[in-house]
Image: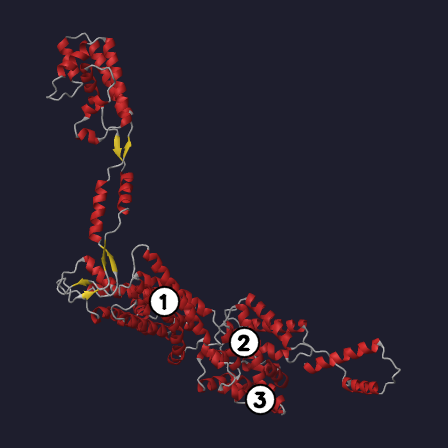
Amino acid sequence: MKRIKFTNLLTDTFSSSKVLNFTIFLLFTILLTGILAARYFLFQSIISDDGTSKRDVVAYKTIKVVDTFKTNQYKKEMAQKIEPVLTPAEDSYIINNFLSLEKNILNIRAKKLAFQTKKDEMSLLFDFDSTNYYKNYILNYLINAENERLDNTFKKSRKTLDTLLKQGITEKDFEQNNLNSLILRNAVYETTKGEMRVISALLEQVIVPNMVVDEVATEIARKNAVNSITPATVTFIKGEKIVEKGELVTKVKRDALQKAGYNVLQLNYKGILGIFCLVCFGVISLLYYLRYFEQKFMNKDYMSIVALLSVVTAIAATLLPDGFSFYFLPFPALAILLSIFTNPRVSFLTSAILIIIISISLQMPLQPAAVFVIVSLIASIATAKIRYSRRFDLLKIGVEISLAMLFFILDLYLIENCITEIDHAVIFTNAFVGFVNGLLSGVIVLGLIPLLESWFKIVTPYGLAEFADHNQPLLKRMQFEAPGTFSHVLMVSNLCEAAAEAIGADPVLARVGAMYHDIGKLKRPLFFVENQTYFGIENPHTKLNPRLSKMVITAHPKDGMDLAKEYGIPPVIQNFIIQHHGDSLASYFYNQAKQQEGEEKVTEEQFRYTCPRPNTKETAILMIADAVESASRTLKEHSPEELDAMINRIIQDRLNDGQLSDSPLTLKDLKTIAQTFSKSLRAAHHQRIKYHENIVQELEEKAMKKKFVAPDKIISDDELKVEKKIQKRLQKNNNE
C-alpha cells in the first residue's frame, strides 16, 4: 500500500506537464543568461589579462572620476586627527578615598606608639617611589605637625582636589607623568614648598582619571569629519588620452574607461552563474505574482509573448555598441506592448524586473535604469486610458512618453551636475536620444501589434475593435441573410457594452462578443422568428414537432462555433457564441411538448441546450442581455415598471436555474446590470406624441380660406395662436 502511494506521489510530482513547464523555464532562463553574458564576449574588454590597456583611448567627452584610493587616505588621516570625546565620571569615589586617607593618618597620629613604629605604619598608606627624596620629610610632617597646621594642610588639599576634579583628569595626564605639575598648577595660593610636597603626596595617592572616553560621541565626531572630506577627483578633458597602449590601468583609469562606455570587465564562470541566478529570481518573482494575482495570464500564449519581448529587449541591450547611450533601449515600447496584451500591472512589473536584470547584468548606470522604471510606469498607465477604436492614440502616448523621458533625463543630470561637472554635449545627446526613443515607441508598437496578434492568437482591444466593423464577412452576411438577427445583436451589443462599463468589465470585449453570439443562425435563418417577419414567411415550426424544433434552435451555438472556426474568429469571441445560452431550458418547445405528449413523457433535460455556462462577467452579461432584449419585444407597453419587472424576472430565472453559478458576477453587479438595461431599453422604446391624421389637410383648407377672406374681416388673436401652435407641431413632426 505504501509502495503504491509513493509511486502515485512520484507520478504526480513528475507529471509530464510539470516537467514540461520546468524544462521551458530552465531553457528560457539559460537563453536569457546566455544573451546577457554574450555582451562580455561580443565586446571584449579593453584591458588585457596582465592589467594593461590593449590600445590608446581618448576621451570623447570631459570625464570626471573619483580617486577612491586618495579619498580613502584622506578620510583615514582625518579620522586619526580627531581626539577622543571625553565625558566626566563619578567623583565620589576619589573624594571618599581622600577622606579615608585623612582618617587613617589621624588614627596613626593618635596612637601611643614609638615614632619609628608610627612612621612605618604611615609609610604603608603611601606608594612612595624609590626616587622620592621627600619621603622622610612628608612622613615626619604628617606625624609631628601640629593639629591646626595639619588640619589646614588637609583643607588646602581638599580645595586643590575639587579644582582638579572640576577641571578633569584624563589618562593622558597619567601617561605623560605630569600629575605632580598639574597639582602644583592648581594648588591653593600661600602654600609653602614643604606643605606643597605633602599636599602633592596626599593627592597622588587618591587621584585617578575622572574623564572617560565616550565611544559613541567619538565615533560620531570621526564620521562627521570623514563626511566633510571632499572626494579627490581626476578629470580627463575631451581629447585627452585616458590610457595609452600597454599602460597599466589603475583603478581611476578603469573607472574613467567604464564611464566612457568601454567594457572593462572579464566575465568568468562565477559571473555567468550570478547572471543566471538573477534571471531565475526575476522570472520566479513574476510567476509568483501572476499565479496569485493574475491567474488568467498563466497560459502559454501570454507567457510566450512576454518571453519573446523580454528576449528581444535583452538582445537589443546586448548588441548596443560601446559608447552608445543606454537611452536607445526600447523599454518604453516594451511597456506599451505588454500593457496592451496583458494589463498595466503586469506590464509595469515585467518591465521593472527586466530593467533590473539587464542593468545589473550589463553594468548599466543607475540614471538610465531609474528613468526607464519611471517611464515604464507612465507608459503602462497611459496605455490603460487610450481609446482602442483609434490607433492614432498610440502616437499620442509616444509623445507623452518622449516628454516624460526628456524631463526625467534633464532632471537627473541637473541633480548629478551639483556633484560633478558634466559635459553639456553629453546631456543634450542623451536627452535627444530619450526623446526620440519615446516618439518611436508608439510607432514601433503600432507596427508590431498586428504581427503579435497573428503569431500568438491573442486578440487585443485593437483587434476587437476591428472585429466590430460591420464590413467583417460574417457581420456582412448577417445583414443580408438574417437581417432580423442582425438588428437583435446590435441592440444586445449596446446593452452589453453599457452594462460591462457600469460594473467594471471589458466593454469592448462585451460589445464585440455580443455582435457575434448569434452567427450560428446564419445556417438556418428562417427558423428564427426575428427573420421570418422580415422575409414575410410562415413560421416553419408550426409544421414540426417540438422535439425537432428544439434540435434546430439549440443547434445554433454549435453551428456558430463551426462558422467562427471557419472564418478565424478568435477563441475569446468564440466563448460568447458557445456560452450565451449555457445549458438553459428551451421553455417554449418544452411547454409545447408537454401539451402534446403529456408531462410524464417529457423531461427538462431533453429540452436543454448542451453548452457550457458563462464563466466570465462579459459572457454572463450577454446571457442576460440576450433574453432581456428578446423579451422586451414582446411587451405591449414599455413603461419603466414593466421593463424593470421583466428584467428582474429574467435575472431571477437565470439565478434559480444555476446559469450564473460559474460566472464571477456578484449580486451588486446584477443590480447594476438591471438598472443599466432598464435605462437603455427605456431610451430605445421611448413613446412619441400621437398626431391627427388629417392635420395637413386641415391646414391646407385653412390657408385657402385665408386667401378669400373679406378685406373687412379681421382674424382674432385666438385663431392666430391656434394656427402658430399647429405650424410648430407640424414642423416638429416633419423633423422627427
**Of 361 and 483, the residue lying toward us:** 361
Secondary structure of residue under mark 3: helix
**Of 703 and 1, the residue lying toward us:** 703
Q: Earlier in the sequence, mark 2 or mark 3?
A: 3
Viewport quadrant of the C terminus: bottom right
Which label sits in the foreground, 2 or 1? 1
For the point 21% across and 18% down, the residue is 199
The tag on residue 622 is 2
**Of 278 and 615, the residue lying toward us:** 278
- Crowding near the residue tagged with mark 1, few <14, some 14–19, many ≥20 C-alpha atoms within 10 Å: many
* Left or right, 621 with reference to 723: left
Query: Up-down: is 629 above or below 87?
Result: below
Find residue 457 and report its image quarter: bottom left
Query: Up-down: is 204 above or below 225?
Result: above
Secondary structure of residue under mark 2: helix
For the point 39% across and 75% down, the residue is 445
Coloration mode: secondary structure
Q: Earlier in the sequence, mark 2 or mark 1?
A: 1
Q: Which residue is mark 3?
A: 527
